[in-house]
Image (spheres, rainbow, N blue to C red):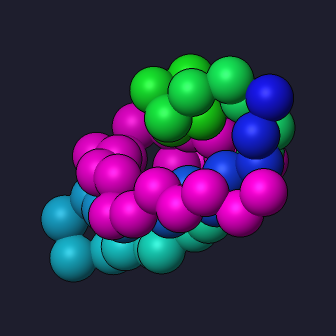
């Protein structure tokens, strides 16, 4: 397992946010899926936003 930092751009119309989170996952694809799920739970009003991955970095 590795630690990843995943950044997103979440937007809806002219409203946007650039959330990121650090997550432990076995591969980059899993990290993106788990990070998006985690952030959508923390930011319930942004669930219907358009989520785009802006970066994925291996931390550990």
**What x and y, as percent, mark residue 32?**
51, 36
Q: Residue at x 61, y 57 (%)?
A: 58
- The answer to which of 17 and 4 lies nearer the viewer is 4
Q: Is residue 45 above or below residue 34?
A: below
Residue that extends furthest to the left in the rendered view of this protein:
13
Q: Residue at x 35, y 52 (%)?
A: 53
Q: Residue at x 60, y 34 (%)?
A: 31
| Residue 19 visible in image | yes
Q: For the image shown, how many numbered marks are present on the structure?
A: 0
- Quadrant of the image containing the N terminus: top right
- The answer to which of 34 and 37 lies nearer the viewer is 34
Q: Is residue 41 above or below residue 26?
A: below
Q: Is residue 19 left or right of residue 12?
A: right
- Quadrant of the image containing the C terminus: bottom right
Residue 19 falls inside the magenta stretch: no
Residue 46 falls inside the magenta stretch: yes
- The answer to which of 48 and 23 lies nearer the viewer is 23
**What x and y, as percent, mark residue 21?**
71, 59
Within the image, what quadrant is residue 26 found in? top right
**What x and y, as percent, mark residue 52?**
29, 51
Q: Is residue 34 left or right of residue 33?
A: right
In the image, which residues are magenta? 34-60
Q: Is residue 56 left or right of residue 24?
A: left
| Residue 22 visible in image | no
**What x and y, as percent, mark residue 46?**
52, 49
Q: Is residue 15 above or below residue 22?
A: below
Q: Is residue 12 left or right of residue 49?
A: left
Q: Residue at x 21, y 76 (%)?
A: 14
């Amino acid at each position: 397992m590795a630690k990843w930092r995943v950044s997103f751009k979440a937007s809806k119309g002219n409203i946007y946010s650039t959330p990121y989170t650090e997550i432990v996952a076995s591969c980059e694809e899993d990290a993106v899926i788990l990070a998006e799920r985690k952030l959508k739970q923390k930011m319930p009003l942004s669930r219907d936003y358009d989520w785009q991955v802006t970066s994925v970095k291996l931390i550990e």
